[in-house]
Amino acid sequence: MQSHGVDMSGPFVDHLRRSVRGYSAGTIYARARIVRRYLDDIADPFGIDAAGVERWATGQGWSSSTVRDSISHLRAFYRWAIRSGLTDRDPTTAIERPRVTRRLPRPARDVAIAVATSTATPELRAMLALMAGAGLRCCEVAGLRWVDVDMIAGTVHVVGKGGRERVLEVAPAIRRALAAIDHPGAIVFGPYTPCRVSQLVNNHLRMVGAGCTAHQLRHRFATRSLEQCGRLDIVRDLLGHASIANTEIYAAVVPGLAGGVCRSVDVPGL
């Protein structure tokens, strides 16, 4: 991760860790990974133009959302490079990021979760339980410490995206799954990176034919929570969303939440 003889790996990651924006470990990992890959591919990152950056991002075979995220990560890198005196220009400012179509969430099916948990190791079973039963992201699972888990009170303290914190009351079954882990260290799992957690969970889900992904376990928690309380603001807080707009999409996949209203609208002449 060098350019013009200057090693930019350590300083850039140090900047992210010290930033007043309080980036989460998952964000730092994702940002550093994209920038490292970019600098490995691009011989002269300070001489490239916007079209070159765009060709690189769109030529990786990524989805529109990943291309959009990668450009955001590179924009952060160039802002740091300008402040550090490494360059005086940011080619990403002229790039129009692709529009990402928001799709409805597809919650993992209960039968798939049951198969996955019944065939998992104790550690993996606890990961699945936290995702499907408490809505944790892979980065939140990776960062969970034993000091964040109160077995007596049945709570888990979670630090999510943007450093947003929340305390979740978890079901007894999730507490039992956590108690079954034989890990003496300060970190509950691993230690693993968010990417490694995602790999472990998704590989297991594929192996057992669950037909879902790690993030769909979180979708399942969101839809079940909305079924239980019917309040988007509560589900927003449970998920750690910054805005209720991110939570609203779950209302469209909860059967019966608005079904009574829709059924009451008649059509004249029918």
Image: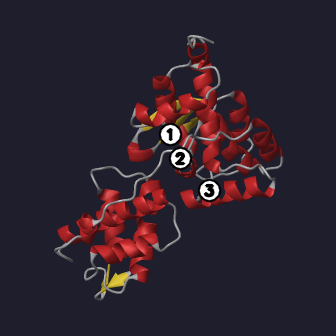
Q: Position of residue 175 (x, y in %)?
A: 68, 34
The residue that label 1 is drawn on is 158
Mark in the foreground, 1 or 3: 3
Q: Residue at x 41, y 59 (%)?
A: 68
Q: Quadrant of residue 85?
A: bottom left
Query: Where residue 25 appears, x then y in whole percent?
Result: 45, 55
Residue located beneath label 2 in the image: 140
Name the spot of residue 210 as percent of width and height, x first: 77, 49
The numbered disc on residue 197 is: 3
Q: Is the Cβ of the residue at disc 2 closer than 8 Å to that at disc 1?
A: yes
What amino acid type is highlighted by mark number 2? Answer: Glu
* Residue type at tag 3: Val
- Residue 51 tag number: none
Q: CA distance from mark 1 to mark 3?
A: 16 Å
Disc 1 residue type (three-letter): Val
**In the structure shown, which secondary structural element does the residue marked by tag 2 occupy?**
helix
